[in-house]
Image: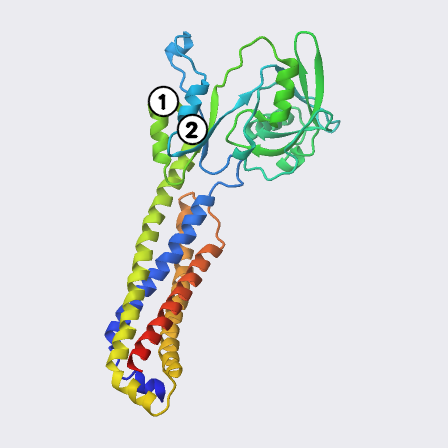
Amino acid sequence: MLNKLLFRNQDKKQLFIAMTGAFLGMTFLITSIHYLIKVNEFGKGADILGPNTIIVQKKVSNSSSLNLTKTDFSVREIDKIKKEPFIEDAQPVISNNFDVSFETADPMVPRFRTDVFIQTVDPKFLDVKSSKWHWKEGNEYVPIIMPREFLVMLNTFMSASGIPQISDDLAMDVKFKFKLKDDTKNEYVDARIIGFTNEVSSILVPQSFMEYGNGKYTSDREKKITQLMISGKESEFGKVEELLKTKGLESKNSQMLVGRLKSVVGTLFLVVLGISVIAVFVSGLVLIQYMQLLMSRNAYEVRTLMRIGYHPKKVIGSFFNYFLKVFGWICTIAIAAFVILKYFLDDLFETGGLYIGTEISLVAMGALGFTFVLFAISSYFTAKKGIFNEF
């Protein structure tokens, strides 16, 4: 009876417009937050590099071949790159300055030996979640991250030898060893694979092992830094590309493609997110104004109800509960629309080669809940202010 009295003077058209705006805003808000997070997660765990990270080196030109220009980085050049506002960090990739070979040391695998090139990078650039990524002298083995192309080469060798090829999991069980040497001495150190990468062409070892080898078996050759690990800020990869062009640097096409793709798609969803926030704010404001208009139209009824004994809190509760139900229905329909939209967008991304996670983002749902709570608080205080003005 109370609701029929208070909401009989509604302008249904205005309420429908406000609800439509809120529905569209909420749907795009959830969608943009969900895919912004999923796109930023794209590539994590697939390789050893952290997000928005690339390995760069100077381009080799004819003048470089004639030793007229350098292809290594000085400390000053590295510091200058670090100071760029769109660069989060830049650290040198340290290479071995001693002779090292790599070979199998497992009775189940035929002997395979080759001279190799090993490197180490700052651990914060690695996306390897393993407690094994450490080494000190006397440890049972050195943990290594192997280039996938090396495993392909090993399997090619085994196939030619008439031996069954090995998978990633089996390769991690195979025993290997390094031979470190200089002109007067040598040493064997056991090694185990703990991961693979498509991004680096050398075997990666912990920094402590590299320091041990360079300190004990280094030659008189000058130590040079020929590669850098660079981490760029989110949605600013275009500036990183511009830096590479300006300074004559280059990186692997696959790394550049992932970085460029994440930057473009991330920027697109940021724009959609901004528009969604504005749409939700405006539609919420329209709903609040509609509540104020409804209360002003029912001013006589409100005053009469309170004069005959209705407590103001009961009248406030009627307006509050009504608009809370309206916004609740908007959120429910928005979630349903998001699930349907997500089905088509996931398929679209997969068709385009962007394999992102399909699970629903909890952050997106949290944003929806936060918006609901914010609207509930605004509705309550608006109803309270409007009713007590008539009291």
Q: Is residue 26 left or right of residue 100?
A: left
Q: Position of residue 73 (x, y in %)?
A: 45, 18
Q: Secondary structure at mark 2?
A: helix
User: Total of numbered circles in the picture?
Assistant: 2
Quarter holding residue 341 = bottom left
Image height of 347 relative to 318, above or below? above
Q: Quadrant of the C terminus?
A: bottom left
Quarter holding residue 7 = bottom left
Q: Residue at x 34, y 33 (%)?
A: 239
Cα gap from disc 2 to disc 1, whole angstroms? 13 Å
Amino acid type, callout 2: Lys
**Is 79 or 72 nearer to us in this picture?**
79
Q: Residue at x 39, y 83 (%)?
A: 314
Could one spot residue 148 in this view of the protein?
yes
Q: Is residue 344 left or right of residue 220?
A: left
Q: Which residue is mark 1?
A: 247
Q: Quadrant of the N terminus?
A: bottom left
At label 1, counting other C-alpha atoms closer than 10 Å, the crowd grade (few under 14, some 14-19, many 20 or more) is few
Q: Of callouts 2 and 1, which one flags the residue occurring earlier in the amino acid sequence?
A: 2
Q: Position of residue 284 (x, y in %)?
A: 32, 65
Q: Furthest residue to the right?
A: 107
**Is 148 or 7 nearer to us in this picture?**
7
Image height of 224 relative to 254, above or below? above
Amino acid type, callout 1: Lys
Q: Is residue 191 left or right of residue 224?
A: right
Q: Which mark is residue 82?
A: 2
Image height of 229 relative to 188, above or below? below
Q: Position of residue 89 (x, y in %)?
A: 46, 32
Q: Position of residue 153 (x, y in %)?
A: 58, 25
